[in-house]
Amino acid sequence: FGGGRKSILPGISSRETIKKNHALLVDERARTTNVENNPVHLDMSEAASFAPPDFVINTVADASGCLVDAYAGEMNAVFLKGAEVAKSLFSLEIDDMFDVLLVSAGGFPKDRNLYQASKTIDNSYRAVVPGGKLILVAECREGIGDPYFEDWMNRYSTYQAAEEAIKTNFVLGGHKAFYMRKAMNRVRLSIVSELDSDVLNRWGINAYRSVGEALEEEMEEYRHYNVTKTSTKINEKVKIGIVKNGLDTLLVPVTINR
């Protein structure tokens, strides 16, 4: 969540303070929409307490940027009220997890580059069973989008390596690589885009040019062939999900009935 304490940290804080704060994201409690015992949030709140604003106005907008509501008053009260409303707008609870999840970032400009579109992965991968498949659809007409993100993806090929780098030498942009490696530590990632396939393959990501091509290939292991192999059908127990605006939709598994 933006607003409230973020006006102070990172708002008017030093680069070193911001780096130290963002390095806390390796904690499992540092999840999107979670403020309870979230070390990133708590650190921001502590920083804001050293220079508390006299008066705060925060707004909540929907995915289209239209104003939903506005709140004014004491910083923490205003922030928590806005966060509650934003959570109800952008979180989607699901009863079970998916074997295959096809997620669109939501089209341009949300998928203008991978740096921007990668938030979709972080919003979605927890809704996929461990070892399952996440297929991101994002055009990425502007390429990767950030040199530090690209450098860290090239340099750190595992989640563990990226995590250690975050802890010891946090770099803005590199944190996106950490998030992606973390997701890839759980699921098998494919991306449908205009990005260089060789680059994605080198990172351990399956690259496709069309959704049809991706589904044809990624669903192969779930197909049942008849004796003559002239027809197939998908295993009816396979759970498949589709999200059309993944950048603005946080999937929240409620129960796991597997």
Image (cartoon, rainbow, N blue to C red):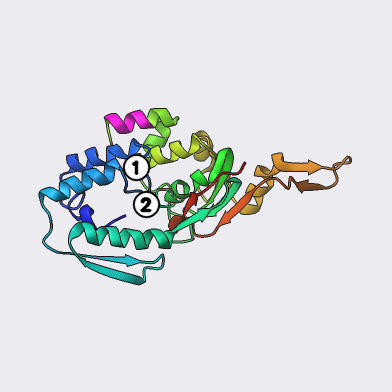
Badge 1 local density, few (<14 within 10 Å), some, or many (20+)? some
At 36% across and 40% down in the image, what residue appears? 29
Which type of secondary structure does the marked residue at label 2 adopt?
A: loop
Give the residue at mark 2.
Answer: 33
The residue stretch that appears in magenta: 163-168
Q: Can residue 171 be seen in this view?
A: no
Q: Name the residue nearer the viewer: 31 or 93.
A: 93
Mark identifier at residue 30: 1
Say if 151 sits above or below 3 in the image. Answer: above
Q: Where is residue 246 in the image (x, y as percent from the top left)?
A: 48, 55
Q: Where is residue 153 in the image (x, y as percent from the top left)?
A: 42, 36
Q: Name the residue nearer the viewer: 9 or 172.
A: 9
Q: Name the residue nearer the viewer: 106 or 113.
A: 106
Please indicate whether residue 160 sits to the left or right of residue 73 in the image: right
Amino acid type, label 2 = Thr
Q: Characterize the magenta stretch by its predominant secondary structure.
A: helix
Q: For the residues marked 1 and 2, what is the alpha-carbon distance in whole angstroms? A: 9 Å
Q: Where is residue 26 in the image (x, y as percent from the top left)?
A: 34, 36
